[in-house]
Amino acid sequence: MAEHETLSRTTGATLVTLVVVACAAGLADALQRRLRLRRRTRHHAGAEPAPVHTHHGAPTIPRQRATGPSAETVRLTEAERDAFAVLVRRLSEGD
């Protein structure tokens, strides 16, 4: 050990290095799990994805679907359209 290096500085640098390595390993594991899940759900396209569990066994929140429900349309009768128009006029005048 050189004169300007102290035991606490060397220990601190070693500790920081170990923490960085542990974080990198955890990140690599999380990415690997995500890739495995993505591959598994590709095979079951259209099927509901299986619940994913963390390494502690607790379930995670499932991802939202990329597509929403199809658009809904309701056919109104002429009387219903007239009533809706009257309602809109009343609400807009009430400002």
Image (cartoon, rainbow, N blue to C red):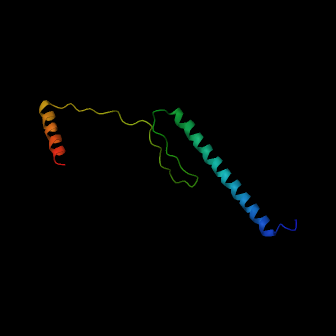
Res 33 → quadrant: top right
Can you give x and y, in whole percent of width and height, for residue 31 in the image?
A: 61, 45
Can you give x and y, in whole percent of width and height, for residue 25 in the image?
A: 67, 51
Which residue is at 13% across, 34% downward? 82
Looking at this rendering, what residue extends furthest in the left direction? 79
Q: Is residue 24 left or right of residue 13?
A: left
Nearest to the observer: residue 70 or residue 51: 70
- Residue 95 vertical placement versus 77 (above, below): below
Which residue is at 29% across, 33% downward? 72
Q: Quadrant of the N terminus?
A: bottom right
Can you give x and y, in whole percent of width and height, for residue 64 in the image?
A: 45, 42
Q: Is residue 16 left or right of residue 31?
A: right
Which residue is at 58% across, 52% downward? 55
Nearest to the observer: residue 55 or residue 8: 8
Res 20 → quadrant: bottom right
- Residue 45 vertical placement versus 32 (above, below): above
Can you give x and y, in whole percent of width and height, for residue 59 in the image?
A: 50, 51
Q: Is residue 24 left or right of residue 75?
A: right
Q: Is residue 84 left or right of residue 40?
A: left
Q: How many marks?
A: 0
Which residue is at 16% across, 41% downward? 89
